[in-house]
Image: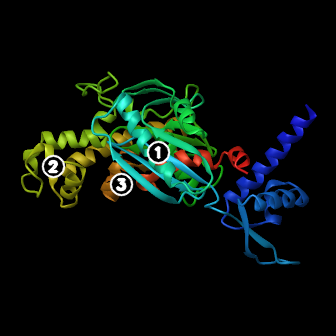
Amino acid sequence: MEKATRQHTKDHNRSLVLSTIFAHNQISRAEIARITKLTRTTVSSIVSDIITEGLVEEVGIGTSYGGKNPILLSLVEDSRWMIGLDLSHNQFRGAIVNLRGVIRDVITMPVEGHDGNEALELLYQIVDQLMQKVTRPLLGIGVGTPGLVNTQKGIILNAVNLNWQNLPLTHILEERYNTPVYVLNDSQAAAIGEKTFGEGYSPEESMVLINIRHGIGAGIVINGSLYQGDGGCAGEIGHIVVVKEGGELCRCGNHGCLETVASAQALIKKARAGIQAFSESSLPHEPKQIDLPEIKAAFDAGNPFAQELVLDTAKFIGMVISNIVSILNIHKIVLVGDMTCFGEKWLNAIYDSAQKYSLQKPMFNTRIEIGQSGENSIILGATAILATDYTLLFSQS
């Protein structure tokens, strides 16, 4: 028992030191001791070990404020690699990512209607190819997937578009590749990726990330930690009903859900239905040829119908944000996904709508902004879970 307690303390202290180095570009041993409240002797011993293991290196001399100039330490970002997978599009994307979130290689494969076992085989193909390109110790595989996910057990409870129900993906991939695997909802992954690898986030900051793609979901970070709810399904805002009368049937079985009026898929569907309204634009007049880039071009050119369609999505997104702010009182809302291509005008319309439907005080300090990590947010989030699980770094030593 005493031995186990000592080991737990050692691992805890080591995690503190690693997380502190991870959070800074360069930092001295003395500063680590100050932040972690560990003794300088303990910090020096841990740092010596992780330098030997190749995780950290001395990178130069810092400024002295009295006494000897400190030696600065930095994470060796390519000392370990991870594989991240994004299953949220009409294509699967896989990437090799280093400890600082730098992508070293990417593979993309179109899904093209594949689901069930066919989709799983496509996933294997991507991982198999990436595994052949890994030339550093591998921490593991992180997966961001649409649908309801039990992260603790690594089970995809229901991913409608992929026709996966109760799929034990963590177990399947760990058995096949003999490496740790994390599986989580794509929007939750995007939130962690934005917070971990985005600039300007404080460790204890709260935020809600809204992921607007084929569907819509949210990742909630409270005091620096991902909030998944009692069942792991927190953030399914795409199925909040926003159209009560005459709402369109949603894939979830309800009518008038946010996804049916504000997702990229919903926008394309409405544009195709109203093709004649695009007659003055350069859009093709064959409905099947209309996609998001075509709508964006019409929107940017000032086409009235395109403007109306896009800004209508903003109204509903703002409505839901007003509810989020009222319930959680979180002041930072970050938007990612395909719909962010419509830029500042769309963003301003969302903010105006959120203000319209909110109490003034909760919205007063609320910032709504477009995320920094772009199309890689889900991949980065899936791997951030691995990079910040410092027990994996111990096991690779």
Q: Secondary structure at mark 3?
A: helix
Please state which of residues 371 and 90 is positioned toward the viewer in this rendering.
Answer: 90
- The residue labelled by disc 2 is 305
Is 54 placed left or right of 33 in the picture? Answer: left
Tell me which residue sits at (59%, 59%) in the image: 100
Q: Earlier in the sequence, mark 3 or mark 1?
A: 1
Query: Marks 3 and 2, how far apart in space?
Result: 18 Å
- The residue labelled by disc 3 is 348
Q: Secondary structure at mark 1?
A: helix
- The residue labelled by disc 1 is 128
Q: Which three-letter amino acid code belongs to the residue tagged 1?
A: Asp
Above-or-below relation of 16 to 30: above
Q: Which three-letter amino acid code belongs to the residue tagged 2?
A: Phe
Q: Are marks 1 and 2 in contact (CB under 8 Å)?
A: no
Q: Earlier in the sequence, mark 3 or mark 2?
A: 2
Comparing labels 1 and 2, the label whose residue is closer to the camera: 1
Please state the horizontal and vertical placement of residue 202, each as a whole percent of the image.
Answer: 63, 55
